[in-house]
Amino acid sequence: MGKVTDVRVMVTGGAGFIGPHVVDRLIKRGDVVRVFDNLSTGSLSNIARYISTGAVELVRGDVRDLAAVKSAADGCELIYHLAAQSSVPKSSEDPRIDMEVNIGGTHSVLMAAREKGAKVVFASSSVVYGRTDKVPTPEDAPLSPYSFYGISKMAAENYCRAYSELFGVPTVILRLFNIYGPGTDKGLMIDLYRKLMRDPGRLEVLGSGNQKKDYLYIDDAVDAFMMAPEKAPCRGEAYNIGLGESYTVFEVAEMMFRTLGLHNVQLSAKGGASWLGDVELTQPSVIKAELELGWKAKVGIQEGLEATLNWFQETLGRVEGGR
């Protein structure tokens, strides 16, 4: 595993979507990084360039394996815990996996952090709020998850908080709202883009099309990950990490048409619920993150969407009839 004294930061789930962006920023600021990932949903290709240069050490392992997590955490002062079963539809198909990975896996990380004296930044989700009546939603709003995924994230948050309060383990919780950008392999924008590649003249969206959500560009999310362990008291506090603005599916689709130069696309909605457990309105209050972390999103949705679509064109191919 190499000289443990050289390792300062561990990133669980570091080969997924958000992880490699966090890893890249850590390397640029001079940290030595260890990625812990079982590659079940992440991809080795996402971090191969870092491994080849020796900037990152990859440890293949599962967060449910306490011994493996403890071994990988040797020498680490900080753990970014991103590993999760993060699909709401999949959580409905098999709630047991959510419980084992998202709750049990987080507990493994917290136990390792306690033993090794490490600080933990936990990637939570906006889904912990469920169908909230408070919009914009502050961090002290009641948590009433509407999906098994949301329940597992809420429980994991409580474990983080309890480990801070009872055992003195420094933890901070980031409630992420729909993160998008280059490297994403799921979510609204890539789903719509793939549909347009199949048929650039017609686009049917899931649900009513009026689902309204907050979308945050990946670079802004990474800023929050970098600032949180330095600025937060790290006593189990939670922070909303979102743009602070919400857009409907129809609005996002129309922005995509304009950016891609597509005209006369027949836009329609399938109707019903998008998927079991979907929350149709998310809009965070981001005042707490601004005041306590000094963090605020910098990239508006149009700028972020353009960068994301450019990446889609480079990696997936161009939409016929577009620019």
Image (cartoon, helix red, strand yellow):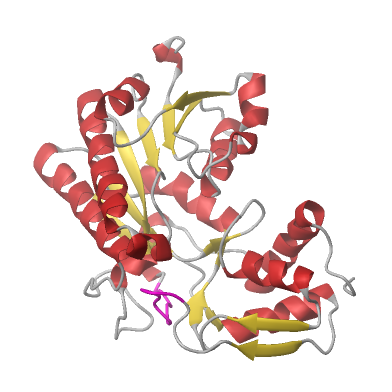
> Going by the picture, which residue comes out furthest to the left?
166
Picture coordinates of residue 250, whole percent (x, y): 62, 86
Magenta region, main secondary structure: loop
Picture coordinates of residue 219, whole percent (x, y): 59, 54
Q: In this view, does 257 lie to the left or right of 191?
A: right
- Residue 121's place in the image compared with 32, above or below, is below
Q: Which residue is drawn at 21% across and 33% down?
A: 111
**Image quadrant in which the N terminus is located:** top left
**Image quadrant in which the C terminus is located:** bottom right
Residue nearest the observer in this picture, 170 or 38: 38
- Residue 225's place in the image compared with 270, above or below, is above
Q: Indicate the quadrant where residue 169 lies.
A: top left
Q: Which residue is drawn at 36% across and 19% down?
A: 75
Residue nearest the observer in this picture, 160 or 150: 150
Q: Indicate the quadrant where residue 301 lies.
A: bottom right
Picture coordinates of residue 58, whole percent (x, y): 51, 25
Q: Is residue 260 left or right of residue 98?
A: right
Residue nearest the observer in this picture, 173 or 199: 199
In this orientation, does residue 234 appear? no
Q: Which residue is drawn at 84% across and 80% down?
A: 262
In this orientation, does residue 31 appear? yes
Magenta segment includes 319? no
Q: Is residue 194 left or right of residue 13?
A: right
- Residue 319's place in the image compared with 22, above or below, is below
Picture coordinates of residue 48, whole percent (x, y): 64, 30
Residue nearest the observer in this picture, 80 or 323: 323
> Going by the picture, which residue comes out furthest to the front?
93
- Residue 73's place in the image compared with 304, above or below, is above
The span shown in magenta is 275-285
